[in-house]
Image (cartoon, rainbow, N blue to C red):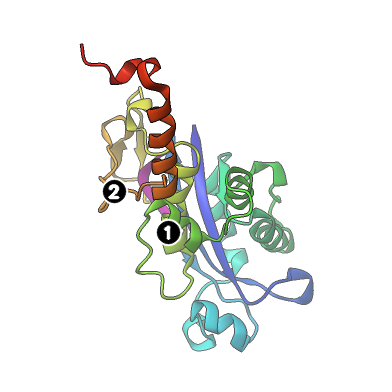
Amino acid sequence: MREIVLDTETTGFEPSEGHRIVEIGAVELFNHLPTGRTYHQYINPRREMPTAAFEVHGLGDEFLRDKPEFREIGQAFLDFIGDAKLVIHNAAFDMKFLNAELGSAGFPTLPNDRAIDTLMIARSKFPGAPASLDALCRRFGVDNSAREKHGALLDSEILAEVYLELVGGRQPDFALGSVSTTSNNGNAAQNIGDWRPRPRPEPLPPRLTEAEAAAHAAFVGKLGDAALWLKRQ
């Protein structure tokens, strides 16, 4: 099962108001494991960067001036994602921008049902809790210390780790087969079945509060001889 974890940076909130994509970052997963293949592209929006957007991602007019336009990189982007599902945080935002750019450049657009929205997964799994990418990093112990500003590739790499936690945590043994993939330049190949994720730098914090632990201990104490698991053999 191939999936692409994806993020974009833009000049604003609405493509219908003339805003454009200025950066795309993507990470390839196979059977919920990163393969090492990534896609990253800065894009010249052919318009001035609003101050509010610049403060978010730090991509200014001077930096983007010599970058290609979307019409020049659209096919390479489509080739990378292929027919994989797209894992996106707040998918509606990125999908409307991607389809606006693809349609304007004459490329086929992407069906919305190709997107897996991690924001919706998080809200469903943790009702009422903060569901931003930073909040989920704190919940799962994912290191986002390098995220001083938004960046499409960095955010995709962080989101890939968060997504793996949302769907059940890192389970490398579920990759039962060995599958070879070709790198983005078509030269090197990688055996996915031999890949193993790195261990966490720090264990996840316990989710049981002291009050809950005390209440459980009090309840077990009332069971007396009924608490068979406490009896010594």
Residue 39's place in the image compared with 85, above or below, is below
Q: In this rendering, is residue 11 above or below 48? A: above
Which residues are drawn in magenta?
Answer: 33-40
Residue lying at the far left of the rendered structure: 233
Q: Which residue is mark 1?
A: 138
| Amino acid found under the numbered disc labelled 2 | Pro
Q: Do the CB atoms of the residues marked 1 and 2 lie less than 8 Å apart?
A: no
184 in the magenta segment: no
In this view, the residue in front, 202 or 70, is 202
User: Which badge, 1 or 2, comes first in the chain's sequence?
Assistant: 1
35 and 104: which one is in front?
A: 35
Q: Is residue 107 left or right of residue 140?
A: right
Q: Please, what is the three-letter code of the amino acid marked with disc 1? A: Arg
The image position of residue 18, as x and y in percent, is 74, 76
In the rendered structure, the answer to whether residue 11 lies left or right of residue 137 reads right
Res 179 label: none
Q: How many marks?
A: 2
Residue 45 picture quarter:
bottom right
Q: Position of residue 148 (x, y in %)?
A: 41, 75
Return the residue nearer the eye: 68 or 142: 142
Coordinates of residue 22 in the picture (x, y in percent): 56, 72
Residue count near mark 2 (Cα–Cα under 10 Å), binned few <14, some 14–19, many ≥20:
few
Instruction: Find out whether residue 34 is within the magenta segment.
Output: yes
29 over 46 or under it: above or below: above
Q: What secondary structure is the magenta-colored segment mainly?
A: strand
Rendered-image quadrant of the C terminus: top left
